[in-house]
Amino acid sequence: MPLALLALAVGAFGIGTTEFVMMGLLPDVADDLGISIPSAGHLVSAYALGVVIGAPLLAAVTARMARRTVLIALMVLFVVGNALSAFAPDEHWLLAARLLSGLPHGAFFGVGAVVATGLVGPERRARSVSLMFLGLTVANIVGVPAATLMGQQLGWRATFLGVSVIGLAAIASLALLIPRYHDRAAPTGGLRGELAALRSLPVWLAFGTTIAGFAALFAAYSYITPMLTDAAGFAETSVTLLLALFGVGATAGNLLGGRLADRAMRSTLFGGLASLVAVLALFPLLMRTEVTAALAVLLLGAAAFTTSSPLQLMVMEKASAAPSLASSANQAAFNLANAGGAWIGGLTLAAGLGVTSPAVAGAALAVLGLGVAAAAYAVDVRRGTAAVRSGGGRLVATHVPERAEEEARR
């Protein structure tokens, strides 16, 4: 694998750290700024809003720019946002800085995925995407706990200064390691051409699979702490270690999913979603003892992140005329899933269905994700069969299923 993927992973590590560290720093931020915990929680929402706005917007605006330049510019914006967070004088300035920090998130992963797949042969495309996402999953094991500890010992402002330093390291890595041929502008039809490429049912079915599949994860993960303490009986001081265990599972699932998806992308996606259904459905049973609860957290991360690389690659293939925009929009879909899943999980708790009920709701959402993925497959088969019958056996679309491709060759 090219060393350039390390530069993308460093950037992903910084982004993953700043995204999740705010959850652990909320009490410190609230005390320092003189606001309530719920008000401080808006800082998490501000970052997510920045991702949703910035992912498609920045990808579309930079469509004609060289991708290497775009990646460096996005990390510069990331550093500025985190530095402004460190020096924010009050809640309103910090909200604006967190929004700014979130803007480059989706576009970086979107454009980065396109660059990553361009660095390797077609047989390693999913693996290259998984290695970029490796920075995000490792951030949950190392970056977030270390940054949280730094904030508790040195003050929360020191955390964002530290994240800014990571961003500077990512800029240097991108400048040194990304090959110069990515300085050339990507072939594109401009903003109108990029948007036109998204007017496709398979693309939107891929987005729908992402939203439903990862909403299943966040329906449960958003309320994992009360499950571990109230149902499994863990002390609150043990939760941080268990969340790191989730990161270990996510890292393993991400690497496994990338390797398997290079062999059979759609089978890996269906297998990952089916595993997620099973794990979430078993949560009420697994949360009865500490040992099985720890296993559940590990399996949850592994099952969910097995699907991350195939989902990203599927979106890029289905929008081959606008891979950067589609890939970035898929990151916005991930964050919509975050917000929507947490909301649905919260509804089950508010209805008094029990502390593990968000996991059951997550299982239902994962079933929905399987259904959307099956619908996407049916559309591909129908289009592939039509192409075989009408075009002398030659298929152009890269996302047509393997069976249709074999029929075309015959």
Image: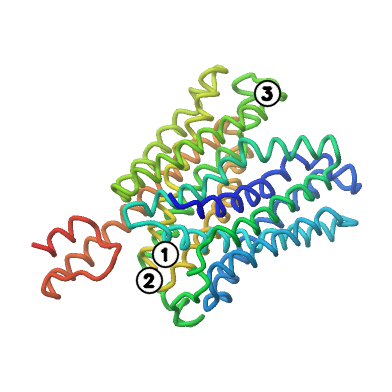
Q: Residue furthest left?
A: 410
The answer for how far apart the CA atoms under marks 1 and 3 are is: 40 Å
Q: Which numbered disc, 1 or 3, marks the residue that appears first in the sequence?
A: 1
The answer for how far apart the CA atoms under marks 2 and 3 are is: 47 Å
Tag 2's secondary structure?
loop
Where's residue 245, x and y in %? 57, 30
Q: Specify the label residue 204 is tagged with.
A: 1
Tag 1's secondary structure?
helix
**Of residues 279 and 301, the one drawn nearer to the viewer in this rendering:** 301
Viewer-nearest of discs 2 and 3: 3
1 and 2 marks in contact (CB < 8 Å): yes
From the viewer's perspective, is residue 177 above or below residue 28? below
The answer for how far apart the CA atoms under marks 1 and 2 are is: 7 Å
Q: Specify the label residue 200 is tagged with.
A: 2
1 and 3 marks in contact (CB < 8 Å): no
Q: Which numbered disc, 2 or 3, marks the residue that appears first in the sequence?
A: 2
Would residue 55 be found to the left or right of residue 235 on screen?
Answer: left
